[in-house]
Image (cartoon, rainbow, N blue to C red):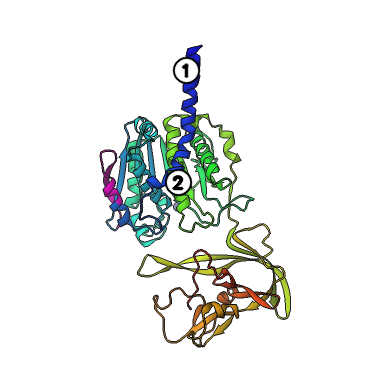
Amino acid sequence: MNKLVTLLGLLFCLSMSAQEFEDLLFTNYEKYKVEGFSQRRTAPESVYAQLEKQNTNTLKVKEVTKSIEGKPIYLVSTGEGETTVLLWSQMHGNESTATRALMDVFEFLQQDDELNTFRETLMSSLNLHFVPMLNPDGGQKWQRRNTLGVDINRDALRLQSPESQILKKLRDSLEAEFGYNLHDQSRYYNAEFTAKPASVSFLATAYNEEKSINENRAKSMQLVLSMNKVIQKFAPGHVGRYSDDFEPRAFGDNIQLWGTSLVLIESGGYFNDREKEFIRKLNFVTILSSLHEIATNKYQENDINDYEKIPRNDRKMFDLKIVNLNYPLLDKEYLVDMGINQNEVERSNERGFSYVGAIADFGDLSTYFGYNNFNAEGYTYVAAKTYSGSLKDTSEWDLLKQGYGFKTYQGVHTKHSFKNILLNRIQEGKMISKASKEVNFFLKKDGEIKFALINGFLIDVDKRVLPEGFNAKTE
Ligand SMILES: [Zn+2]
């Protein structure tokens, strides 16, 4: 009897500890979060500098090849266990969320604290290999493709790039049992039929046209189910299931075919998280807790029939959705909804960008969702005016209240000409483009201007608070 009680107690402790790991990672995240990676546009040099610091007894950092432009690509290895796991991030240069999370994962792996039990389980059961930032040239230029102009994820068979060659070589030499293929997806994906962005999407990648499920792929599905549970806990409903259409040229599909159980993790969008800091945290928690599931074989308890229950990825989000707008055209009014996106436009010569608002869709958008939503019922549409006077005796906020959306300037502008402006700038004598007019207007109620749409961002002109990421446009 005593033995039974002890055994039950032990089992209880084991299951508790396994369950709690993700909670502990989530609550203690700040302890492991590495500074200097709060922006998506992470320079390869920042990653290299951090890896240099992490090259310790615990983590072995080794240069394994160079990119086309000669930038080093590193392999970070740790653990003495039997189960080999290979993880790589940023095969697409402008997808850095997981790279940033890996910096935190490395920090976690070599700290010495009350989570040592978990750490030891990982180290003693697993043989871990990470390639953070597989495409440093693309990372430097903030572009998807590598310097050759090739999408590395369509180069798994032809292997024309050193970045592709090293991934294949590592897969084959390590014979990894599990693979993590870490990417970013558009922030406009949502979990199907819901207003929730797919902050993280998973895929147990198919290895043939028929999308068969062999033992390898079944393990991928079970691992996805473990990851799904974790995200559902911290961001309920924010998970999507990526399409499993077979792509014969892609790495994920081939690595699955070559015998490694592969999981694709795509970081999407989240509310008020343009720089994906919260999603980086979700990556950190998911990667480590799922590795723990592998180390303890706990993922095997998942039923693969639950895999299809994860909502599919859909692409139905807008940055801003305005509904019930009475839109004037040739002396008549029409009831429309507007889907507006704030698209990123790169600025040359610096790792910067600005947003340019644009209509993404127009009409009945009742099946779509917005990060921000506004019901324009009862408001009158007013076109934006252009102000040509001086700003000496008035403020931009006052002008906004009076319905001015543009301010003229003379001569040419440089990228440093206008900082922290509220009204769009337009060169004197120049016509405002049709695309610009569409995302710059005012909404009036009771004879007063209440809201301004400036460069696709909605501003309450009385509250005078700017929305996240706001910038006006200079034409
Ligand atoms: Zn990608």
Crowding at mark 2 (Cα within 10 Å: few <14, some 14-19, many 20+): many
Crowding at mark 1 (Cα within 10 Å: few <14, some 14-19, many 20+): few
Circle 1 sits on which residue?
6
Q: Is residue 193 depicted above or below 439 in this figure? A: above
Q: Compare residues 217 and 425 and report the one nearer the observer.
A: 425
Amino acid type, label 2: Asn
Query: Relative to 20, is 368 on the left or the right?
Result: right
Q: Quadrant of residue 375?
A: bottom right
Residue 53, position in %: x, y?
27, 48
Q: Residue at x 62, y 62 (%)?
A: 373
Magenta residue span: 50-68
User: Which mark identifies residue 162?
Assistant: none
Secondary structure of residue under mark 2: helix
Circle 2 sits on which residue?
283
Q: Is residue 248 visible?
A: no
Specify the farthest residue to the right. 332
